[in-house]
Amino acid sequence: MATRAPERAAPPRRPGGKRRLTGRHWRHMVDVKASPYAYVAPFFLLFCAFGLFPIGYTLWVSLHEWTLLDDEHTFVGLENFRVLLADSYFWNATFNTLSIGLLSMLPQLLLALWLAHLLNRPLRAQNFFRITLLLPNVTSVVAVVVIFSQIFGRDFGLINWVITSFGFEGVAWRDGTLSSHVAISTMIMWRWTGYNALILLAAMQAVPRELYEAATIDGASSFTQLRKVTVPMIRPTIAFVVITSTIGSMQIFAEPLLFGAYTLTGGQDRQYQTLSLFFYENYMRLDFGFSSAISWMIFVFILIIAGINYLLTNRMKGSIR
Amino acid sequence: MSHPPRRRAARLLVPLIAASLLAAACGGGESTPAPGAASGGASAPAEPVKLTVALFSDFHYGPLYEEFKKTHPNVEITERRAQFNDHHNNLVTQVATGAGAADVVAVEGGFIATFREVADKFHNLGDYGLSSRQSEYLDWKWQLGLSKDGSQLIGLGTDVGGLAMCYRPDLFKEAGLPTNRDEVSALWPTWEQYVETGKKFVAAGGKAAFTDGPGEHFRAMVEQAPVGFYDTSDKVVVGSNPDVRKAWDISVSMIQNKLSGKLVAFTPEWTTGIAKGTFATMVCPAWKTGVIKDQKPGEGTWDIAAVPGGGGNQGGTHLLAPKQGKHPKEAAELINFLTSKESQLTLWKDASALPSLPALYTDPAVAEFVNPYFGDAPIGKIFTDAAKALKPQYTGPKSGDVNVAMGNGLGRIELQGQDPEEAWKQAVADSEKIK
């Protein structure tokens, strides 16, 4: 935005043979200079009202002892943050968030890449397959979690039924840390793999065909082509997918909440309580000061991760050029 | 370049207007006028009055509104409904921001303590003559409707959720235990005897567990004690209250004697287990009979006996009038009407809402009511007996959260294998952290 404005504003000064500012001319100047701002204004006004202001106000609230029903809000400085950083449940939630995020993201990315690669060739009923990929994403998250909670059930779940039919002991998916993370990651993967595959597919279609032809002539297998041609060519898109899914994974909420049958602690041992759920638990106690501190820490985490991503992406772009 | 100037001006103006409209719309959002405020200026007696009633499910109030309008022809009533959690969260926000609340609101037992803390945000129904109804009510139910210091009456009770013990006669028969509900009730006058019965059940070697999980039992035991999680000065006394420790120990012995099916209420395994018979007993507030029925275990599969330890309650609702309402007199009259003896009897018949007025418990419609789905169990009598037997206990502001913390502790013992003493320490520490 800041870099574009001067470029746009520059042209009208040049064609000035006549210097007189007629009404028409003046309107033209205003039009050229002001309308770009007017066009983008709705977004920025809304962003200020619903994005920037809440972020700032949350910071203000987080510096107070603030419960919703109390009229008095005492200023306590960074006390909420001190308590939060000393709270082992907060770090537990951070660990769970990262663990579920990684467990869902890595397989998801590989799977999406593979699916996109399969679809990136002449196929019958191509559109059918592409739309099918998107279907899990348009399904309500509640429906997805309810179904998967049944599948991962301890006593009557489909997966345990298969496991026990092979003579092994069934898994209490909800009770273990790793097992519950796997279950939740599966739900996330189910919803987002197809969506990411479509984005990657779009990028793959922009890769020049000649490269593949040359590779085929050189005797490269389909897998080698994927590894040596496709992936390097679509790196920026891969980076985009990684960034959006990391930010998404910081906000995992509905899956653990519903998987635990609406318990806010994410299991008795908080074994699958994510940061968002930890925030929600404290919010539901109407402890706004403390929960604001939590949401600010989540914000800081996202900034850090976005920063790391930004550095990595820059490096990747550099290696392509 | 050949656009006529007017069109260019339009091109410039349209987004500007759009932007300013949006800005105006956003600015307007901060001061949504309270519903019903439109008629606020009126003061003439015959002036029409609009009342809104906010509920969290269908309370079957429709016919009662019509009845009320016969004596109050100037009152118009609209009803709003929201999902259970949303309803209470909305109400907290509306009370905190001073706008948007209905004239009459329903508050469930799990949330009433939150609003008793801020009694000044509600009309004192005592000012409108409703204190006179105290003698009609179950004592503990009445106490819940008072402000924390007892000086104000902020709500009148509607229904209660009397407690019982649901059990499966078929599994009891397999284990060689009696199946008749009176004999079953006689097995466990106390919780210790309930555990003993469970041991016999387990010793018989059936596949099913004796009960779902210890959480609900723990809660019921604590609520039967004279003092619960809080003392009257709102201090959490979990760690020092011997009754809480006793309830904990009995719950732990349920786990250690393998009475528990390691099930958490409302998880898929639990709901499926109701129909499949993975456990033989569960603590049953009146409303849980509906949950059982929904799982379609079959008629007569579950039966209902008395809860050990003498009486109990879970849930039940009060009607309150937020102070932002402009028609406190009419709101109070409506609350009085909706909670009256006649209305509560109608609601028992229409919506199976257990009355909170003991005078109704001898009414044949309640006392002789049997439910064929539960082997013709006289549920009216069982549940009202439980509600009557319950002694009032002071409920602190965050009792629900403390209960979750303690229940999680018990869950950790049986699901994650935590040492009971460690689980106790952690649960007590968690409870004391709750502000």
Image (spheres, coloured by chain):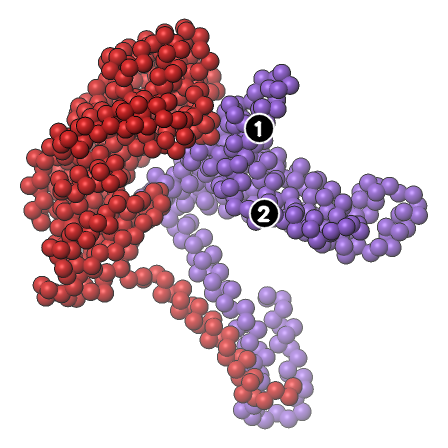
Chain colours: A purple, B red
Query: Would you name the residue on which mark 1 appears?
Result: A158
Q: Residue at x 13, y 55 (%)?
A: B70
The answer to whether tags 1 and 2 share a subunit is yes
Placement of B176 over or under B137, stated as above or below: above
State which quadrant residue B156 falls in: top left
- Observer-nearest of A269 and B282: B282
Q: Residue at x 54, y 87 (%)?
A: B6
Can you say which quadrant of the picture contains the N terminus of chain B? bottom right
State which quadrant residue B76 falls in: bottom left
Neighbor class of circle 2 (other Cα within 10 Å; few <14, some 14-19, many 20+) is some
Image location (x, y in percent) of residue B104: 21, 50
Neighbor class of circle 1 (other Cα within 10 Å; few <14, some 14-19, many 20+) is some
Query: Is residue B206 visible in this depiction of the protein?
Result: yes
Q: Residue at x 64, y 77 (%)?
A: A10
Q: Residue at x 62, y 20 (%)?
A: A165
Asked if residue B25 lies left or right of residue A111, the reply is left
Work out how far the residue at label 1 is from the one at label 2, CA to CA, in angstroms: 22 Å
Check disc 2 and give the amino acid type: Asn
Give me the disc on residue A137. 2
- Observer-nearest of B355 and A310: B355
Image location (x, y in percent) of residue A266: 46, 32
